[in-house]
């Protein structure tokens, strides 16, 4: 697993970590001659977010220590070491630790204790509860992925935590009251003989849950606007004695959404800071960005609100430092700043590793089970811009499952199409043994399979929307596969179809790129009024990515996880042979000439 002396691939820069965690010293304001300097105290907030089931610095898909091109490390065990260093450095002073959500989904470790041996069936403590309880957080905000496995598992995980879980804008659909704890006010000691500081912490989750996990929350929970919810609760927290107000928000700061206007803004953190008075700082997550320090001016008070986002998976730790004075019985912040710590500078915390070791090892044993033999190596490296067998494998299984389920129904005579997205650029089925971790590495999300009926016109509109993924490149212009896509569109929001043959002309404007769309194996153009059953994942069907025409009543929804369907198919066949499922049905072109 991990070397007891630290990461094997680089020197651990403990000295650098110690330097990075040195306390920020507030510069004292200039004083009139003979005037006494006002006494100051300080508070440090440490923030994590989007840990996504990562405890060990381990890549379960590669069965090896995690590494990437920037030599990042991951995991709560690494975060724990940094947090403990700062707590030791600040012994006798106030240090709070918060998390901004997306905690219990994202790795085979998290999936195993939600699906293979769900904690709701065994009563076992979730690995992320074990790890975070060792650190002893002050609060965690619920992220949208906390709702992936249903409310019973979420409720049990919350009960297993030794600290509060917050989500002020998740409301009981029947009573209109908060479904979870909206906020806490912590009494904090700033040191010997210091008056008590009351710190209010408000948690805000993402409204997109209503789309992304509609099957788990519809009719049970309502997700209100994050800005409006902050405006409601911040004055209440102040009225109840909060001297300082922090928000832990699971939403980005861009002010944009991946869905349409039917739900409140997905990434409104900067708007919260700008529009809601009384907030001192916001720790945020969701976008997986590294935002070290950003100040937003509140338009009503002129106050500077401090924002910070600590990347993803435990790669970074936000540190916010506040200098405070007290005059006439009131606390005032005289200075605030944020910095970012890198977990690749430290070793993993042994107590966190020990708390999760048995679960980690059980997960490794599970994902290394062989499910089939592949006749050749299949790679996802080019799946974004070329039709590849490994992506066709997903579409073939989805088509087969939906087709079999609809046999004998009124939809049995309709052609079955399938949609898949290139979730991974690194997934590989090696020639020979294919293991569960190889399949899981290809399909990294816990989506379930659904199907709807689309017309030919709706299919074309869908493909045109998907094709906005590509940059516009004139005929003859050089093509760099690494730069071929629009960075504003993530890979998971680009879909390819099986069951139809089509060309995407990337020299043409967005909306005019599908230049050929015919029934597979024919030259017959797809008629606008043609009818198709389309196999699709629940995220997309419920509105994720804001694709047109797909949000409609399902004709198939057996709540079967697509990843498990892929594993089951491979196990049943015993052999993965592209000859059984690969059909080259789409290509990128410019004026009819293939790009590749």
Image: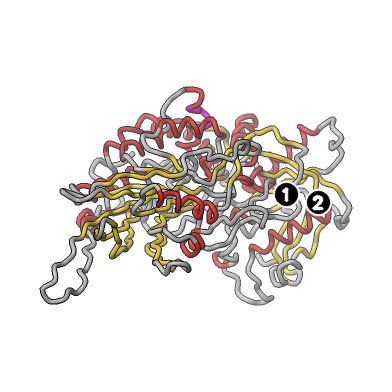
Residue range in magenta is 114-119
Provide the secondary structure element on which disc 1 rests. loop
Q: Which of 69 and 411 is in front in this view?
A: 411
Instruction: Mark 2: give few (<14), some (14-19) or many (20+) Cα within 10 Å.
Output: some
- At a point 47% along the width and 55% down the height, the residue shown is 288
Answer above or below: position of 505 versus 582: below
User: SS for tag 2?
Assistant: loop
Residue at 87 percent of width and 56 percent of height: 528
Q: Name the residue under label 2.
A: 520
Q: Nearer the viewer, residue 511 or 379?
A: 511
The reply to whether dot 1 and dot 2 touch (C-beta < 8 Å) is yes
Query: Is residue 27 among what the camera can see?
Result: yes
Residue 389 position in % (x across, y down): 65, 48
Percent position of residue 434, x then y: 54, 38
Q: In this view, does 35 lie to the left or right of 110?
A: left
550 to the left or right of 486: right
| Colour scheme of the picture | secondary structure
Question: Foreground: 594 or 494?
Answer: 494
Q: Quadrant of residue 572?
A: top right
Whichever of labels 1 and 2 marks the residue nearer the N terminus, that label is 2
Residue named by callout 1 = 583
Residue 563 falls in which quadrant of the image?
A: top right
Give percent across and percent down for residue 497: 72, 51
Question: Is 231 contained in the magenta span?
Answer: no
Q: Quadrant where the N terminus lies?
A: top left
Main SS type for the magenta part?
A: helix
Q: Which quarter of the rendering shows the C terminus?
A: bottom right
From the viewer's perspective, is residue 129 above or below residue 100?
above
Q: With 120 as the anchor, is 29 left or right in this view? A: left
In the displayed structure, would residue 558 be above or below residue 522? above
Circle 1 packing at 10 Å, graded few (<14), some (14-19), many (20+), is some
């Amino acid at each position: 697993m991990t070397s007891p002396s630290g990461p094997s691939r680089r020197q651990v820069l403990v000295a650098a970590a110690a330097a990075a965690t040195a306390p920020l010293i507030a510069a004292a304001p200039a004083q009139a001659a003979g005037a006494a300097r006002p006494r100051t105290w300080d508070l440090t907030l440490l923030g994590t977010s989007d840990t996504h089931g990562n405890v060990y610095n381990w890549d379960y898909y590669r069965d090896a220590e995690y590494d990437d091109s920037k030599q990042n490390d991951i995991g709560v065990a690494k975060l724990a070491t940094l947090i403990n260093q700062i707590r030791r450095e600040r012994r006798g002073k106030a240090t709070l630790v918060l998390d901004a959500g997306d905690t219990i989904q994202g790795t085979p470790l998290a999936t195993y204790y939600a699906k293979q041996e769900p904690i709701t069936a065994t009563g076992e403590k979730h690995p992320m509860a074990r790890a975070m309880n060792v650190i002893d957080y002050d609060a965690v905000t619920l992220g949208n992925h906390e709702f992936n496995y249903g409310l019973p598992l979420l409720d049990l995980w919350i009960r297993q935590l030794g600290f509060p879980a917050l989500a002020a804008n998740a409301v009981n659909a029947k009573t209109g009251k908060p479904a979870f704890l909206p906020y806490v006010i912590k009494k904090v000691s700033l040191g010997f003989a210091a008056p008590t500081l009351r710190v209010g912490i408000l948690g805000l989750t993402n409204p997109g849950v209503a789309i992304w996990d509609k099957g788990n929350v519809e009719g049970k929970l309502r997700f209100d606007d994050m800005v409006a919810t902050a405006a409601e609760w911040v004055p209440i927290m102040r009225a109840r004695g909060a001297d300082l107000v922090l928000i832990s928000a699971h939403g980005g700061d861009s002010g944009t959404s991946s869905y349409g206007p039917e739900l409140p803004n997905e990434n409104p953190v900067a708007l919260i800071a700008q529009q809601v008075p009384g907030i001192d700082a916001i720790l945020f997550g969701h976008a997986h960005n590294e935002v070290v320090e950003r100040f937003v001016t509140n338009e009503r008070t002129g106050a500077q609100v401090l924002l910070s986002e600590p990347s993803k998976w435990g790669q970074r730790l936000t540190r916010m430092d506040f200098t405070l004075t007290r005059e006439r019985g009131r606390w005032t912040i005289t200075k605030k700043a944020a910095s970012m710590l890198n977990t690749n500078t430290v070793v993993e915390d042994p107590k966190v590793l020990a708390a999760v070791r048995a679960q980690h090892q059980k997960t490794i044993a599970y994902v290394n089970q062989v499910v089939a033999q592949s006749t050749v190596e299949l790679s996802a490296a080019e799946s974004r811009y070329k039709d590849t067998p490994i992506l066709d494998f997903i579409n073939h299984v989805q088509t087969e499952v939906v087709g079999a389920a609809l046999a004998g129904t009124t939809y049995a005579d309709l052609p079955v199409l399938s949609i898949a997205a290139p979730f991974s650029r690194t997934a590989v089925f090696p020639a020979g043994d294919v293991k569960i971790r190889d399949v899981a590495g290809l399909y990294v999300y816990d989506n379930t399979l659904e199907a709807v009926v689309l017309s030919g016109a709706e299919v074309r509109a869908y493909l045109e929307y998907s094709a906005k993924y590509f940059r516009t490149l004139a005929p003859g212009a050089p093509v760099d596969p690494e730069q071929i896509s629009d960075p504003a569109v993530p890979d998971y929001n680009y879909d390819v179809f099986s069951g139809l043959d089509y060309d995407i002309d990337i020299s043409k404007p967005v909306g005019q790129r599908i230049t050929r769309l015919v029934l597979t194996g024919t030259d017959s153009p797809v008629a606008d009024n043609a009818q198709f059953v389309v196999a699709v994942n629940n995220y997309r069907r419920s509105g994720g990515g804001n694709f047109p025409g797909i949000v409609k009543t399902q004709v198939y929804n057996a709540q079967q996880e697509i990843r498990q369907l892929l594993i089951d198919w491979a196990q049943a066949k015993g052999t993965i042979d592209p000859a059984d499922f690969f059909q080259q049905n789409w290509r990128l072109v410019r004026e009819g000439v293939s790009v590749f």
